[in-house]
Image: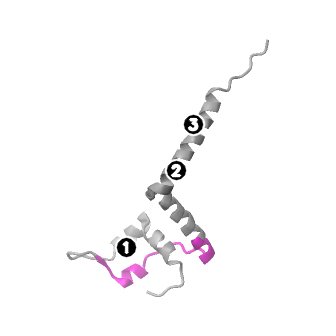
């Protein structure tokens, strides 16, 4: 199938639950499940501009890296927990002043 879309965007969008359901309708059953080209071409997906596709891919790539790459994900998680701790510490230790 030839197209002028961002291939990584298509990969992400075709892995969504909705796309998976649509792909399931055209599967050919055997020992290995195959999707035919006509069945795949019938899948309806959102197609924003190429610029927007690139923006979405960057966001999803970063999120994927944070979730699956321990060298970048763990430090980010530690930093997020520190900020969360500071927020709740400040909330818990801020008292209303009693007027005398």
Q: Which residue is mark 3?
A: 85
Look at discs 3 and 2 and give the one toward the viewer: 2
Ranked by sequence position, the earlier of labels 3 and 1 is: 1
Q: Which mark is residue 23?
A: 1
Ranked by sequence position, the earlier of labels 3 and 2 is: 2
| Image side of residue 40 versus residue 28, left or right | right
Q: Residue 51: image x %, image y %?
A: 62, 74
Q: Residue at x 78, y 15 (%)?
A: 99
The magenta span reads 34-54
Ranked by sequence position, the earlier of labels 2 and 1 is: 1
Q: Residue 49: image x %, image y %?
A: 61, 76
Helix, strand or loop for disc 1: helix
Give the quadrant of residue 18: bottom left
Q: Residue at x 67, y 26 (%)?
A: 94
Examine the rendered structure and indicate whether residue 53 appears above or below residue 85.
Answer: below
Of residue 17 and residue 94, the one placed in the foreground of this image is 94
| Image side of residue 44 versus residue 27, left or right | right
Give the quadrant of residue 59: bottom right
Q: Which residue is mark 2?
A: 75
Helix, strand or loop for disc 2: helix
Look at discs 3 and 1 and give the one toward the viewer: 3
Q: CA distance from mark 3 to mark 1?
A: 44 Å
Of residue 31 and residue 70, the one placed in the foreground of this image is 70
Q: Residue at x 52, y 45 (%)?
A: 78
- Coloration of the structure image: one colour
């Amino acid at each position: 199938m030839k197209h002028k879309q961002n291939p990584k965007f298509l990969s992400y969008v075709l892995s969504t639950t909705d796309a998976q359901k649509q792909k399931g309708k055209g599967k050919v059953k055997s020992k290995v499940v195959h999707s035919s080209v006509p069945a795949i071409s019938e899948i309806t997906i959102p197609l924003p501009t190429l610029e927007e596709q690139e923006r979405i891919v960057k966001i999803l790539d970063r999120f994927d890296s944070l979730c699956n790459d321990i060298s970048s994900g763990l430090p980010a998680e530690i930093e997020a927990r520190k900020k969360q701790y500071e927020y709740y510490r400040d909330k818990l230790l801020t008292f209303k002043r009693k007027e005398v």
